[in-house]
Image (spheres, grey):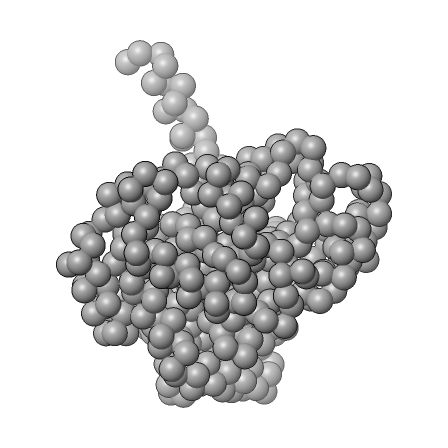
Amino acid sequence: MPSGSAVWTERLEAAAAWRRTQGLWRERNTLQPELLDFAGNDYLGLKDDPRLAEAQATAVRRFGAGAGASHLVSGHLEVHEALERRLAALVGRPRALLFSTGYMANLGTLQALCDSDTLLFQDRLNHASLLDGAALTGARSRRFHHRDLDDLERLLSRAPAEAAKLVASDGVFSMDGDVADIGGLATVSARHGAWLMIDDAHGIGILGAHGDGCVGHAHGIEHVPVLVGTLGKALGTGGAFVAGSEALIEHLIQFARAYVYTTAQPPGVAAASLAALDVLAAEPERRQQLRDNIHYFRHEAALLGLPLGDSFTPIQPLVLGEGRQVMHWAARLREAGLLVGAIRPPTVPNGEARLRITLRASHPRESLDRLLEALARLYEEDAA
Ligand SMILES: *Cc1c(COP(=O)(O)O)cnc(C)c1O
């Protein structure tokens, strides 16, 4: 065997051994249809809606299975244009730009806005795509304590007044379900001449008067100049968007490499997103059902003494601490026909491994009761 490949074999084996000894080995399971799903992000049950499937099929017949090229070459189709207009209207911004994934939207936006002269301030618990985007830009990056405006203020006040500054935060934190203080972030950012970027991947479709998210129309473009949303969560499809001013969107079209150098989203997916926006507008009762389910689940969990995190969104974390315990609970729940997220470091900080339970509008009460009973049993066993 040539010596070069021995180096690689050793590297891969060492990485795998390290991850296994930490109890952090990850596996992909194909979703078993008989399991009740409390792990996914399809909060409004739109993923399987026949109207989305129909819109997708129609668009595939009309525009083709793929876009055929990047947006700046010949892949920018009518359906993409229509979707961008609808997304801009949803969040009350002049323009929106469609990206293939939320991960790419964050990477592309940070890379296009920042360079080694900019200062970037991020909440400690921001999504990996924001942290990775910061690394990509070479910007000087600081992390402030989770939702701690005083800490942010302290960091901003040390920064040179003339420097370009960007504050970035998740809207709804993806592993905790808590929501950023948008008004507070906007005030502190404005005081220091910083732009505010909010990634509302889990708020779009759920929060706000119209599913316009935690930023929505309440905090205008002057407060949150850069707004990111994703379509693969509550809207049930895939892709993401950045919304903002004419100048911001044109800047991204020119400079965001994750936008420029990739094939445009398949048109059928964009058409399904348009259909999802129609359902979102026509059926506000889905959001009400979801809120009812969240309220019921939290109320019953409190009666059982389950230590849920403080969240009023569909993301309900049950922090257990150690990765092994989380894997044990998740396996026992699976035996009982219940699928929940088992989240371990490095996705969350050390010692904060957790079950990530997600609720949906379409979960019937009996399903919620089944989960609550199973959790209560495990909780009692652990205490004994
Ligand atoms: C899921 C998520 C993303 C990534 O979006 P994808 O479309 O799945 O790539 C980005 N930011 C946050 C906060 C997320 O939860």
On screen, residue 230 above or below 250: below
Image quadrant in which you'd find residue 16: top left
List x then y, in percent, for residue 337. Answer: 33, 73
Q: How many numbered dots are placed on residues in this image?
A: 0
At x 43%, y 83%, the residue is: 284
> In which quadrant is the N terminus drawn?
top left
Closest to the observer, 61 or 346 = 61
Q: Which residue lies furthest to the left in this view?
A: 61
Residue at image coords 57%, 55%? 245
Q: Quadrant of the C terminus?
A: bottom right
Q: Is residue 49 above or below residue 101?
A: below
- Foreground residue among 147 and 261: 261
Residue in the picture at 37% in, 24% down: 9
Camera-nearest residue between 128 and 3: 128
Instruction: Decide if residue 230 is in sight here.
Output: yes
155 horizontally vs 225: left or right? right
User: In the rendering, at what x and y percent does residue 188 appear?
Assistant: 78, 58
Residue 49, how many percent across, how many down? 28, 74
Left-right relation of 179 to 341: right
Q: Quadrant of residue 360?
A: bottom left
Q: Is residue 167 above or below residue 329?
A: above
Question: Residue pushed farthest top?
Answer: 2
Q: Can the viewer see residue 177 in this picture?
A: no
- Which quadrant holds residue 172? bottom right
- For image coordinates 54% across by 74% down, the residue present is 207
